[in-house]
Amino acid sequence: MMTESRPMLEDVARQPAILASLMSRAADFRAAAGVLGGREGRVLVTSCGDGHFAAMAACSSASRLGLDWRAVGPLDLLVGADERRDGDRVIAVSMSGNVDRTVEAARMAQARGLPILALVNGEGGRLGALARRKISLDLPDIAPFLCGTASYTATLAALLLFAQGLAGRPEPDLSPLAAVQRGARAAALPVTAEIARQGFSGVRLLAAGAEQGTAAYGAAKFVELTRLSVWSGELEEFAHSQYWSMPRTDLVVILATHPVVAGYARESTRALAELGVSTLAIDTADAPVETATWRVTLPPVDTALAPLASAIPLQLLAYRMAEAAGLDPDTRLHLKNDAERFRVSRMLTRRSLLGTGL
């Protein structure tokens, strides 16, 4: 009997193995960043989309290591081209290496004499050709045009290793996070399947601290896969902004992997229940959010490293909601088949790929 291929689910499931593979090269990633210098000076991590979200998610761990780590969009880097400081270093992230603004920002930084390290996959396209120093994730694709799943957590792991290399501290060990990722997937599978059957009108993803990067990443995946109305934001600011226009039929997801955030999440989910709004908390056993409608509880995990696992429930929920909407998350043909919108997307971000179908 032939088994139906589900590449995105395979990609989600292989994340622990990918992390283990990267850890076998941990010394290489630390050394690649180490040549940029030590703790002194700003570390400007520039990327678009998933790379930018991963840079945000790495900030807590980098801060612990004593780094002035900044997730800076490439357009912001270009706008601030004349604001260079002594000791600035640039890490440019692009799996394809062909995102226009990331390449332009790297070219500008190089012209101003800033040390640059490129994180790519494979040869790294135009960015890989430009950068004097680069390192590849060497992550084989399961299927073409697949939504970023394993590539996202692999990028985040690489950035965490870069931070260790810059700080001269080969710790913490990321290897135990593979077990946390497996636990996150196991906990999320039944919950996300149940939620997807509810037919929500939209999703609001809320967080604080480094998990704001995870929330922004999750929102991007929902938009790519489901075409639902999706927003991400800071947990407190939600009450002052999105809340007022949110339909009661939306799902509110709170990333509550830090005990401080979990405390506020309990209050928020209790309050939203009075409005009849359903909530999902991604929490931990040490700081449960018992007042949420649904919970995905992660195994014990260092709060600074939790983004390596907390993204997995969002990946699975986006997948199941896409299926429920009659879309195919394994091909995302609803994006490519909208030929005009797809062409304009390339005009916005990857002009060099116009007409290639990529």
Image (tube, rainbow, N blue to C red):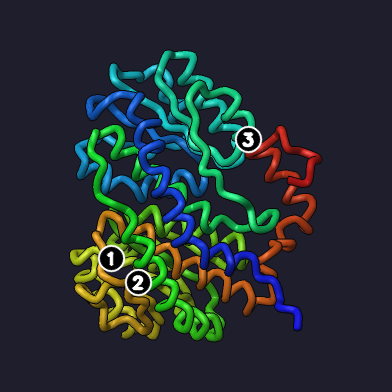
Say whether marks 1 and 2 touch (CB < 8 Å): yes
Using a 10 Å C-alpha cutoff, classify the residue at mark 2 as few (fewer than 14 neighbours), some (14 to 19) or many (20 or more): many
Q: Position of residue 127 (x, y in %)?
A: 57, 29
- Residue at horizontal 53%, vertical 85%? 198
Q: Which residue is mark 3?
A: 98
Q: Quadrant of the C terminus?
A: top right
Residue with the most extreme front position: 24
Whether residue 99 is visible here, answered yes or no, is: no
Is label 3 in a helix, a strand or a loop? loop
Q: Who is closer to the viewer here, 31 or 264?
A: 31
Q: Which residue is mark 2?
A: 282
Say whether marks 3 and 1 touch (CB < 8 Å): no
User: Mark 1 or mark 2, which has the lower sequence index?
Assistant: 1
Q: Which quadrant of the figure has residue 211?
A: bottom left
Q: Position of residue 156 (x, y in %)?
A: 41, 49
Q: Position of residue 13 (x, y in %)?
A: 52, 67
CA gap between label 3 and label 1 equals: 34 Å
Using a 10 Å C-alpha cutoff, classify the residue at mark 3 as few (fewer than 14 neighbours), some (14 to 19) or many (20 or more): some
Of the numbered discs in the image, which one, if any, rests on residue 257? 1
Is label 2 in a helix, a strand or a loop? strand
Q: Quadrant of the N terminus?
A: bottom right
User: Mark 3 or mark 1, which has the lower sequence index?
Assistant: 3
